[in-house]
Image (spheres, rainbow, N blue to C red):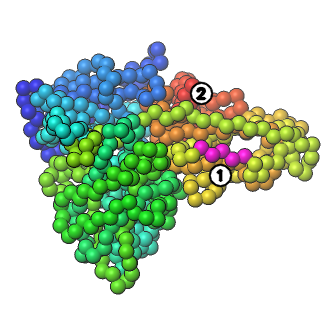
Amino acid sequence: MKNYIKAISILSFILLFNVSSYAFANNEIRTKIEIFENSISDKNIDLTMSVFDKNATWNKTRTYYWAKDSIVEIFGYYDDIHLERKNIILSRKGGYDVSTTDYLLRAKIKKSGSLVEQPITFIFLWKNSGDGLKIIAMNHPNLLNDYSQISEPQTGLGSAIKLIAEADAYVYAYNYRNWNRSNRGRYDQLVAGWHPTGGESRAYIKFDLFGTDASKVNKAILKLYHFQTSGNNGVELGIYRVTSLWNEGSDTYHSGRKEKTAPPGDISWVQQPKIDSAPIATFNPGTGMRDWTKINITSLVKQWLSGTPNYGLVIKPIGHLGRNISVSTYHFASRERKADLDNPKGESKVPMLILSENQNGGNAITQPPQQHHATKPTKSKFSCANQDNEEKGCCCFKGAHTYRFGSRHVTNVLTRFDTGRRFNCRSTVNLDVDRGNGWETVKTVQANSSREGSEVAPTDVLVPVNGAIEGFRISDGCACCIDSSEITLNADYPGGGLPQQPAGGIGKDIAIDGSGRPWVIGSDNGIYHGTGSGWVQQPGGGIGKDIAIDSEGRPWVIGSD
């Protein structure tokens, strides 16, 4: 590269993928690709992007050679960068149902012989219009700011890795406008401290240590960008290890409005995870603003690397707290905070964890949050003996079947009931989950209610879990005429089964198949959900062999299991 990348305050480009018709050949979608807008102002900037499903074979890499007035797209193959699915939000726009998907792209930008990795956000919009499938992609506004080059480690200091928070949220005890029950996982700030009227604020943060070599971590520093102190700094903060699951959620703070209650599983003040009783570190950010606060949490990170479950950490006030204690709350940048909100503008201020090989530190190389391979969907099958008893039915297993699978994020549970054919039973079966705080019922299923002597095909019941759970069970009463059941649990990481995400998932109008390709579901009345003979597909080849619709009209990737 001959030119240095100049600081660019706002940069966006939009690619329009217009799929007005489908051609099915060799399991590929043929699309018409057009350039909709390009506001790149600098010449000779190379960005290489790769898009592929973590669990499939569809791999595409697009290298964009940006000039002032055009983008030339060249397809190649690179396996060192990839796009990973993140959060999904449903909204309304222009009278159409819109599915908005945030993606994290690991891209390498070539600048003066150096490679700099920066996250890029892609937003995919779909609407049911005469134009068919429209996908709009926009990059992060600060992508091409003048980032420092990655230099070689200094002699004697060793290298360091900078991890970006993979999840963060803050909770507030105040019940005003339902604040204590609302989720702020998408809010652009983390708050921790004390208010004599509202009570405590706490900040939760989690870093992904997957693949970290424990032998090379001798120092771990948590970096938080402190941009405001409300009141004074009379209250100290403590960092505590979180000991149970929590889900970041996708809601935020809405000024002047009553907040909606967070869905089950999404973190709020009344839905907090368990934490240790003693802090691993204490600190006071002070009254200064717009500066980094650094806290040594080496002991906690070493616990995680030695096998202690990593549920993240929480920052909360310590010491005596009461109405006689003045306001003392500290505001830190969350991972959603825009880089141009605070000085120096254009520099990322998200929560970071610096892992150093040497206790004196080293030069940090940024690693964006990872979404690694999940295991294949987990199945657990059980059976119970038939009972020739008209009062009890065929099988009574009240609370008898419980499946525990530890601290794993799960997006849904697919339960297959192989129903019997003996009696006309109308009892119900409860499907329960344990999110770490005891059992709760997420779905009630009507047992076999056919007339006596009829044969009933197996029934698939899909249960959206919407978060992280620790266990699943079938309970409550005698489930008449149930011969056996099979449970399939699916992790929410890409490639880990059905890719429905928490809080709404992909949505009812668009789906991604096993090769990472989008398909329009449409409003065809012929779509069906799972039956005993398998998943029935939309007629006419519409959705494709890897997509199925559940009984509530939502699309799911089936995969090859």
**Disc number at residue 416?**
none
Q: In the figure, is residue 417 to the left or right of 560?
A: right
Residue 453 counted in the magenta span: no
Identify the residue at horizontal 40%, vertical 56% (top origin). Answer: 313
Q: Is residue 91 visible?
A: no
Task: State whether residue 203 is above or below residue 493.
Answer: below
Residue 520 in the image, given as x and y percentages of width and height = 46, 32
**Disc number at residue 432?**
1
Q: Give the quarter of the figure containing the C terminus.
A: top right
Residue 100 in the image, given as x and y percentages of width and height = 38, 43
- Amino acid at circle 1: Asp
Q: Give the distance between the C-alpha atoms of the residues marked 2 and 1, in whole angstroms.
A: 24 Å
Would you name the residue on which mark 2 appears?
561
Q: Between residues 543 and 396, which one lies in front from this camera angle? A: 396
Q: Between residues 417 and 159, which one lies in front from this camera angle? A: 159
Task: State whether residue 272 is above or below residue 409.
Answer: below
Q: Give the quarter of the figure containing the N terminus.
A: top left
Q: Residues within 10 Å of mark 1 (few under 14, many from 20)?
A: many
Mark closest to the chain's N terminus, 2 or 1: 1
- Amino acid at circle 2: Asp
Q: Is residue 506 visible?
A: yes
Identify the residue at horizontal 27%, vertical 76% (top origin). Answer: 234
Dominant secondary structure, magenta:
strand
Which range is magenta? Answer: 401-405
Residue 19 lies in quadrant: top left
Q: Between residues 451 and 473, which one lies in front from this camera angle? A: 473
Looking at the image, the residue that sits furthest to the bottom is 324
